[in-house]
């Protein structure tokens, strides 16, 4: 039922979920993920189709080092952009930050739609493929997800991660304890953008075409749903939520048009039945002690 | 006046003509005072007198409209709270502001961050466990290290806030109603703890407290605020007899 293509999409969903999770772990509701995702994808599409040096062959192939170079460049570009934009928008709090980041998504979407070199409404197509088929993408996408997950896990024990949690719990108290909260929020925002940008690079090659519709407000809402359904208190929540909500529309295909109703029901009932999300720290603790019990 | 044993001439904190307005309300009106190094200094006054506003301006949370604040001669105005903390002022909050989702130990670690980064970049973070243990030991929370801060009792929360503030390595500690909600035994313990902190960390302590016997017994000097003005300043015994203070606050009990 789940083929390799869908699996790659699920992993991409998990990555975008983590990108929304990171600012949220510092208490910041940012919906900017699709903007940086679109920028990363556009950069990859442009470079690999226009820049002969990257070695995009006439047969539609792309050498692996070129993909790595694209990832690096996208990470740099989105990181710098996020640092610049974040300095402005992170002065806003709560719902105002959310609105400002929606505006950013819209600006990027309109820019990609209208810039002379991004292909307008049709977008860029025939993006060279570093891998022959969908299964080839599993490794790099999974690799990026493992790297991101490891980073999120590691953060919990690092000063930055603790400062993020402190800002989320009580920003004023964190300030009064010598934490530069502006810098902490900006770091989380930049990490989130770099992750979204890198995900965009992989997605552009995987999808073979790229256009302005890849990064819209709809994606903001969908990725937020990943985090809310999966749970925002541990990084496994958004990973689970992203994979589940990406797979569900495909898995529900057999039930026909009713699948949209079912999909809506899941999004509606999730927060009602599990307000903290499906994966909570308490749940992980129970699972952990079960595992230890079984191991004995 | 029984002078504190620290060098009498050098004030650590100087407040000069501090004025703070919220719209039409003048919360602080030309307040001046100075706190000497090593002193335990009490700030009392009826509700709404401006005590917490003074703490908020000292910690950079609320900007002052007029006046000057100096810590060891260095101006504090215009600094953000984290900058002021790094200069050596730490505070606790009247309505407890712990990081509820973090553990007791992690709350203290957050306080340690900046200090460790200053003292030995990179490596300092590794010695944190020892320092956290020492601080938790001091406030008798060593056994609760791994508990979520949200599960602590009221008195324990107050003590954890003190440990967390101490972790930032302050010269001046601001305690906002540290005894609020404590029972008499806990209040006695707190008095002992505050004296111990002054000795152990060579601290200067400025505290707001409503419980008059505690303030009178603990403080070297006391300032009394009423409607944003400083109406008295001096040793506890003198303040207690001051007719203006008796009228405004103590209610003629002496």
Image (cartoon, helix red, strand yellow):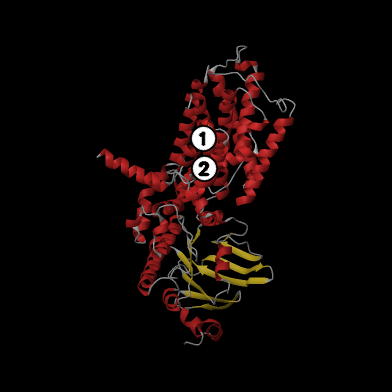
**For residue A42, above or below residue A102:** above
- At a point 50% along the width and 83% down the height, the residue shown is B250
To which residue does mark 1 refer?
A248
Discs 1, 2: same chain: yes
Residue B85 locus on image (x, y percent): 52, 56
User: Is residue A205 shown left or right of residue A235?
Assistant: right
Whether pointer 1 and pointer 2 mark residues with C-beta atoms closer than 8 Å, the reply is yes
Visible residue check, residue A20? no
**Sequence-wise first label, 1 or 2:** 1
Q: Secondary structure at mark 2?
A: helix
To which residue does mark 2 refer?
A266
User: Is residue A18 shown left or right of residue B125?
Assistant: right
- At a point 45% along the width and 66% down the height, the residue shown is B38
Mark 2: few/some/many CA within 10 Å (<14, 14-19, 20+) = some
Q: Residue furthest top?
A: A58
Q: Chain of mark 1?
A: A
Q: Using the image as rendered, state which of residue B103 and residue B57 is in the foreground.
A: B103
Residue B239 locus on image (x, y percent): 50, 81
Q: Between marks 1 and 2, how big is the CA–CA gap? A: 9 Å
Mark 1: few/some/many CA within 10 Å (<14, 14-19, 20+) = some
Residue A232 locus on image (x, y percent): 49, 45
Residue A47 tag number: none
Residue A73 locus on image (x, y percent): 59, 27
Q: Secondary structure at mark 1?
A: helix
How many discs mark residues in the rendered view?
A: 2
- At a point 48% along the width and 42% down the height, the residue shown is A230
Q: Chain of mark 2?
A: A
Q: Quadrant of residue A71?
A: top right
């Amino acid at each position: 039922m789940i083929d390799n293509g869908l699996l790659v999409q699920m992993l991409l969903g998990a990555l975008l979920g983590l990108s929304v999770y990171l600012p949220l772990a510092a208490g910041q509701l940012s919906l900017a993920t699709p903007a940086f995702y679109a920028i990363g994808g556009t950069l990859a599409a442009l470079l690999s189709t226009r820049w002969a040096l990257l070695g995009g062959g006439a047969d539609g192939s792309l050498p692996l080092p070129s993909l790595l170079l694209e990832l690096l460049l996208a990470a740099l570009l989105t990181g710098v952009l996020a640092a610049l934009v974040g300095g402005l928008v992170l002065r806003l709090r709560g719902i105002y930050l959310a609105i400002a980041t929606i505006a950013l998504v819209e600006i990027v979407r309109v820019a990609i739609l209208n810039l002379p070199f991004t292909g307008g409404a049709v977008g860029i197509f025939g993006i060279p493929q570093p891998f022959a088929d969908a299964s080839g993408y599993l490794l790099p996408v999974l690799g990026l997800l493992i790297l991101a997950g490891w980073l999120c896990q590691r953060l919990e024990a690092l000063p930055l991660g603790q400062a993020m949690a402190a800002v989320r719990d009580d920003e004023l108290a964190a300030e009064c304890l010598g934490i530069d909260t502006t810098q902490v929020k900006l770091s989380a925002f930049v990490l989130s953008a770099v992750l979204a940008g890198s995900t965009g690079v992989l997605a552009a090659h995987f999808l073979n075409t790229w256009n302005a519709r890849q990064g819209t407000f709809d994606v903001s809402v969908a990725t937020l749903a990943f985090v809310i359904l999966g749970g925002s208190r541990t990084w496994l929540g958004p990973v689970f939520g992203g994979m589940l909500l990406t797979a569900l529309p495909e898995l529900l295909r057999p039930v026909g048009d009713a699948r949209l109703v079912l999909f809506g029901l899941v999004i509606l009932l999730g927060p009602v039945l599990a307000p903290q999300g499906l994966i909570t720290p308490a749940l992980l603790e129970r699972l952990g002690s079960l595992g230890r019990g079984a191991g004995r | 006046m029984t002078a504190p044993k620290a060098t009498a001439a050098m004030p650590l904190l100087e407040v000069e003509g501090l004025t703070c307005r919220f719209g039409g309300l003048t919360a602080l009106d030309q307040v001046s005072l100075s706190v000497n190094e090593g002193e335990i200094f009490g700030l009392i006054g009826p509700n709404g007198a401006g005590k917490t506003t003074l703490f908020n301006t000292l910690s950079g949370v609320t900007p002052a409209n007029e006046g000057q604040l100096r810590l060891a001669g260095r101006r504090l105005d215009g600094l953000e709270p984290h900058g002021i903390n790094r200069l050596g002022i730490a505070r606790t909050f009247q309505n407890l502001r712990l990081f509820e989702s973090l553990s007791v130990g992690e709350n203290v670690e957050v306080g340690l961050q900046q200090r460790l980064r200053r003292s030995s970049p990179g490596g300092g973070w590794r010695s944190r466990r020892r320092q956290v243990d020492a601080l938790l030991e001091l406030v008798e929370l060593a056994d609760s290290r791994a508990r979520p801060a949200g599960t602590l009792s009221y008195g324990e929360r107050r003590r954890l806030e003190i440990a967390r503030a101490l972790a930032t390595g302050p010269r001046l500690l601001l305690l906002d109603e540290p005894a609020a909600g404590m029972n008499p035994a806990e209040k006695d313990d707190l008095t002992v703890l505050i004296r111990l902190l002054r000795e152990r960390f060579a601290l200067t302590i400025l505290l707001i407290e409503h419980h008059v016997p505690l303030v009178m017994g603990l403080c070297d000097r006391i300032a009394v605020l009423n409607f944003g003005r400083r109406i008295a300043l001096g040793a506890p015994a003198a303040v207690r007899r001051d007719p203006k203070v008796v009228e405004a606050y103590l209610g003629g009990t002496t």
